[in-house]
Amino acid sequence: MIQVAVNGYGTIGKRVADAVREQPDMEVVGVAKTRPNFEAETALEKGFPLYAAIEERADQFAEAGLEIAGPVEDLVDEADVVVDATPSGIGAENKSMYEEYDTPALYQGGEDADLVDVSFNARSNFEDAVDADHVRVVSCNTTGLSRVLAPLREAYGVEKVRATLVRRGGDPGQTSRGPINDILPNPVTIPSHHGPDVETIFDDLDIDTLGMKVPATLMHMHSLNVTLAEEVDASEVRDLFVDESRLFLIPERMDIDGSGKLKEYAMDAGRPRGDIWENCIWEESISTVGNDLYLFQGIHQESDVVPENVDAIRAVLGAADAEESIETTNETMGVGL
Ligand code: NAD
């Protein structure tokens, strides 16, 4: 069994811990937290051993009546691999600890690409991460774009990508984020940083991205234009996407007009936390004009990277190939709407 540590048990970390627990070949050896908040309590209720991420604050857990298994260093030492899901920039600070204990580490999209050996998306470049020590599972938006671009590149070739990312202001739990009543060009400079991030997955890709932030918490929305290397009928693209396990084509008959109904559907379907691990592409939006493909897709920022983290664990340990890992992850988590 692969012993997995999760350092940083917040939005991403707690979801990764739950997904890892579902895997037949993995075990959560423990999770590390900085403070005894509600997530620390639920971690213990779920039976995850809790480690103190910051030594000086370890007493706070005892004061809150929460049992600590030890300092984060013990957790990292014990684990075969650590998933660092701390806030942006903290992963970089933690890197030397992982090196000290010789434990391979996965970082999240908030870290810089040059921190790691490989930026990872299971569908696009699983093999690049095999046996790497430091791997970054790319951001929710980059994951969403990569999953669409990988099959398009393989089937038709891609000449140019233009994407406008309408970004949620914050996650539902991020009470300090905004805007509350505005529409922001964000970042205001063009192209946005998202395009170069996708190029960490496909280094020969020509992509320009623009970002906006809106008063929403549920999901991001991408408006995508891909210039293909050949003229393709929209129905062919639909058929191509249907075969992709992490792309959900929203059928017209479902009458899902936005991210609100998508989240409602996920909750009705019994998804944990109402998570949507798949890209949600409106089938009717898939259109072609000459070589140009257009579509809209919704991306659930809190969860699309979760199956990718599970696959990245197998990749760095050489525990399975891409196909085998993706299939196991999908089956155990229930990916595929
Ligand atoms: P979060 O704030 O919800 O969770 C981070 C957790 O790490 C918190 O519980 C925090 O208390 C804890 N923490 C802080 N300092 C720590 C330390 N030194 N050691 C251990 N734990 C520490 O953040 P998140 O949204 O889960 O983001 C984590 C990473 O995932 C970031 O790189 C982010 O860019 C990336 N990411 C976030 C999203 C998203 O939409 N939430 C999507 C994809 C990727």
Image (cartoon, grey):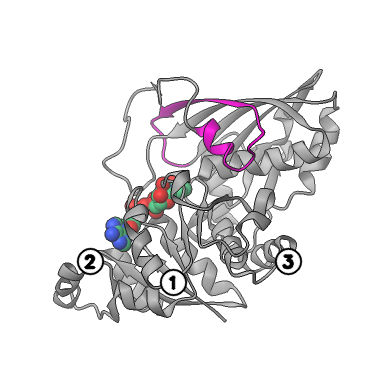
Quarter occupied by residue 186: top left
Residue type, mark 1 in image: Asp
Quarter occupied by residue 296: top right
Q: Is residue 332 left or right of residue 291?
A: left
Vertical arrangement, residue 273 with respect to residue 255, above or below: below
Taking depth in this image into account, of 332 and 324 the one nearest to the observer is 324
Magenta stretch: give its range: 194-218
Q: Is residue 88 magenta?
A: no
Marks 3,1: beta carbons within 8 A: no
Residue density around tag 2, few if under 14, some if 14–19, many if 20 or more, within 10 Å: some
Q: Can the viewer see residue 48 in this picture?
A: no
Q: Position of residue 215 (x, y in %)?
A: 38, 31
Q: Is mark 2 within 8 Å of ligand 1?
A: yes
Q: Position of residue 60 (x, y in %)?
A: 15, 71
Residue density around tag 3, few if under 14, some if 14–19, many if 20 or more, within 10 Å: few
Sequence order check, earlier mark of 2 and 3: 2
Q: What residue is shown with label 1?
A: 102
Vertical arrangement, residue 300 with respect to residue 6, above or below: above
Badge 2 marks a residue whose secondary structure is loop
Taking depth in this image into account, of 96 and 119 the one nearest to the observer is 96
Q: Is residue 211 magenta?
A: yes
Q: Is residue 92 left or right of residue 236?
A: left
